[in-house]
Image (cartoon, rainbow, N blue to C red):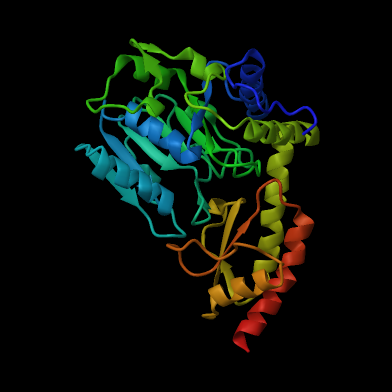
Amino acid sequence: MKDAFLGRSHRSKEGKARLNDVIERTRRILSIPDDYRIAIVPASDTGAVEMALWSLLGARGVDLLAWESFGQDWVTDVVKQLKLQDVRSFDAPYGALPDLTQVDFTRDVVFTWNGTTSGVRVPDGAWIPSDREGLTICDATSAVYAMDLPWRKLDVITWSWQKVLGGEAQHGMLVLSPRAAERLTSYTPSWPLPKLFRLTAKGALSEGVFKGETINTPSMLCVEDALDGLQWAEKIGGLKALIARSEANLTAIATWVAKTPWVEFLASVPNTRSNTSICLVFTDGSDAAAIAKLLEAENVALDVAAYRAAPAGLRIWGGATVETADIEALLPWIEWAHAQAAA
């Protein structure tokens, strides 16, 4: 905190420099193409997704993919709030993916890369064509910094500092491909856009937004925290090291699950299992909520109960900031809590 830029305007020369530093470090660590634009936007990942949906959709038909709660939220927004008529929705239950071969890429496509509340991710970008006509809008909030994203297959990518970097929430990141930027300047939605969603002015892109000139007032304390996380990522070896740390956490849990008869992954297909939001279910009918409470009472694991709308179980965060040794230390405690709950 010694050199933190606090108590000053984010619009000052120094303030904008810090915000732009977040953008440029993000680009370098993630190898985001030079012609993609990156912005810091309000309201965490949710704000970034909403900004994309309200600003870009409506120019052509939309295919929506949902296999957990946040994907369902975007379906609700497009169908019930924007009230678009030419919409197709492909859903799957928690633990599974919809049939990706049904997607029509002449249309815009909205999906999550990693189901934060289901522990199910798309395995890769092979199902997305490079010569698509529509835009791909990807909520990647619990994937970025832990999974290798095919940037050229994605036109809009969103996330927050909260997830894999382990930073504070509130601020979102929005990345636009040249095709998405062109849509913004060539298409005007039929509905009014709140100021917080506006990325254009007088028919042109608001370029300042992509250089650290945020739409609203950001927390410079959160900015310092984000910079600290990015500098740590650079220090340990960048994206490759971050992915390796997260994959090691998944491997530790997978090794334990393989030898434990009463627990299984919610995601049944191995190459769709998330390495960040790792979701487990008890196959013997154990009381998952009781097990989570026992772990919290012992100060062993906090907030590990499954998401409220998901099947009962545990959701263990395996992002890059988590030490594999701590994951390994947790597993015997789950065995203890399982036995206690059954007693």
Residue 165 image point, x, y percent: 65, 41
Taking depth in this image into account, of 40 and 11 the one nearest to the observer is: 11
The residue drawn where x is 48% and y is 13% is 207
> Based on the displayed image, in which of its 4 quarters is residue 142 positioned?
top right
Vertical placement of residue 82 versus 323, above or below: above
Residue 128 image point, x, y percent: 44, 34
Vertical placement of residue 153 versus 167, above or below: above
Residue 341 image point, x, y percent: 61, 83
Residue 127 seen in the figure:
no
191 left or right of 115 in image = left
Residue 244 image point, x, y percent: 72, 44
Residue at far bottom of view: 343
52 left or right of 228 in image = left
The residue drawn where x is 67% and y is 16% is 14
Residue 297 seen in the figure:
yes
Taking depth in this image into account, of 218 and 192 the one nearest to the observer is: 218
309 left or right of 249 in image = left
Q: In which quarter of the image is the N terminus?
A: top right
Residue at far left of view: 85
Vertical placement of residue 122 versus 155, above or below: below
The residue drawn where x is 60% and y is 71% is 292
